[in-house]
Amino acid sequence: MGQLLNAADFRHAAQRRLPRGLFEYIDRGAEDELALSNLRRSLDAIRLSPRVLTGHPERDLRVRVMEREIAMPVVVAPTALAGLVAYDGEAKLARAAARQGVPFCISTQSITTIEEVRAGAPDADLWFQLYLWKDRELTRKLLDRVWACNVTTLVVTADTPIGPKREYNQRNGFSIPFIYSLRAALDVAMRPRWLAGVLLRYLHTTGMPTYGHYPEEFRSAITRPSIVEAVKLENLLNWDDLRILRQQWKGRLIVKGILHPQDAREAADLGADGIVISAHGGRNLDIAPVPAEVLPDIADAVGNRLEILADSGVRRGSDVLKYISLGAQAVMLGRLPLWGLAAGDEKGADQMLAMIRTEIDMTLTMLGVRRPEDCRGLPIRSTWI
Ligand SMILES: Cc1cc2nc3c(=O)[nH]c(=O)nc-3n(C[C@H](O)[C@H](O)[C@H](O)COP(=O)(O)O)c2cc1C
C-alpha cells in the first residue's frame, strides 16, 4: 500500500481487486455519464487565492456538525453494498471513520445490518441513510431498529425516486440479489482473491450477501415477488412524508440530494437540521446541475437556518475545501473510502481518510489560513460556471 499516494492510485488498485461488475457499479455514473464529467470539470475549474506570510503555527481541521465536533470536515457517505467491497465492509468503514474522528453513514442498502455494524464499531459516530420504502410500516420498524442502536442522525435521501439507468450494470449482469449468469461467474472467477476473501467467506458464514435490512423474504426466490413491491423506492415521496418523518424521528434529520434553493427552504421550513447538496456522485440524474453551481445560492437562502453538507466528485483534500469555500460546513465522501477499502481493506480505508486529512492540512497551509471555514473569505475564481 506504500505506493498508493493519491485517490487515482487507490482507484486503480480497486479496479485490479474487484470483479468488473462491482468495480463499475461503484465507479461509473448514469446514462451518458455527463454529470460525472461535469462534476470533475466544475471542481477543477475552481481556484482559491492564497494569502501569504500569515504564519499560523498549526492548522485546526475540527468542525462542528450535527452538534458534535468532528476531526475534519468530512463524513463517510452512505454507499449501498459497501459490504461487497470487503468482507464485513460496512463495519470496517465505520471503524476507519471512527479512527479518523469522522462520522460514518450506513446505507439502507448495506450488506451488514445496523446492529452488526454497531456491534463491530461500538465507538463509531454512526448515521443512518434512509430510503423510504413503499411499505411505511416496514420503514417505521427499520427506524426503530436504527434508534435502538444509538444512532441519532438520520439522512433521508430525496434524489432517488426510482432506480437510475445504468446500462453497464445490465451488461455486466450485476444485480441484487445476484442472478447467476455465465458472464458474472467468469468475472468473479477472474478475481480469486475477492472470491475467496469476500464472497466465499459470506457463503460460509451468513449466506449469499444481499441487502441486510430488507425483510428475510427478499432473499428467497419463492417469496421475493410478494415483498419486492413493499420495499421498492417510494417514487411518490413528497414533503408531507418528510413532515411526518420529522414528527416521528426524535433525532437530527438531514435531507440528502438537494440542488434547488426552494427545496432547501422547504427542508428548513419543516425543521430539518441539515441538507446535503449532492448530485449523488453523478449516478442518478445525468442532466442535474453540479453542487458547485448551486451551493452559493442555497447557502444564501438557508445557510443561517440549517447545516449544509455537500458531496459529489471529491478526489482531493483541496476539493473538500472548495465546497467549503462555496458555503458547505462539511463534505461527504462516497467512492474514496470504497476505493480505500478495496485496495487495502480496513487499513486501506483508514489510509485513504488519513491521506485526505493530510491533503486538507497541506492545502490550508498553502492557502495561508488556519481553519477550513477560513477558506470562505478567500476570493474564488472559476472559469466553468
Ligand atoms: C457505490 C455507491 C453506492 C451508493 N449508495 C448510496 C445509497 O445507498 N444511498 C445514498 O443516499 N447515496 C448513495 N450513494 C451516493 C453517495 O452517498 C454520495 O452522494 C456520492 O457517492 C458522492 O459522490 P462521490 O462518490 O464522487 O464522492 C452511493 C454512491 C456510490 C459510489
Image (cartoon, helix red, strand yellow):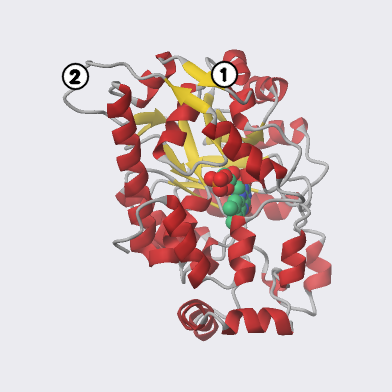
Element assignment for label 1: helix
Q: How many marks?
A: 2
The quarter of the rendered structure image containing the C terminus is top right
Q: Residue furthest front?
A: 383
The amino acid sitting under disc 2 is Gly
- In which quarter of the view is residue 81 placed? bottom right
Q: Which residue is mark 2?
A: 55
- In which quarter of the view is residue 27 placed? bottom right
Mark 2 Cα shell of 10 Å, populated few (<14), some (14-19), many (≥20): few
The disc at residue 299 is 1
- In the image shown, does 169 or 201 lie closer to the viewer? 169
Residue at 78% in and 72% down = 224
Name above or below for residue 285 compared with residue 200: above
Residue at 78% in and 40% down = 237
Give the x, y percent position of residue 122: 35, 56
Residue at 35% in and 20% down = 50
- In which quarter of the view is residue 58 placed? top left
Element assignment for label 2: loop
The quarter of the rendered structure image containing the N terminus is bottom left
The reply to whether the residue tagged 2 has its Cβ within 8 angstroms of ligand 1 is no
Q: Earlier in the sequence, mark 1 or mark 2?
A: 2
Q: Is residue 258 left or right of residue 335?
A: right
The disc at residue 57 is none
The amino acid sitting under disc 1 is Ala
Mark 1 Cα shell of 10 Å, populated few (<14), some (14-19), many (≥20): many
Q: Are marks 1 and 2 in contact (CB under 8 Å)?
A: no
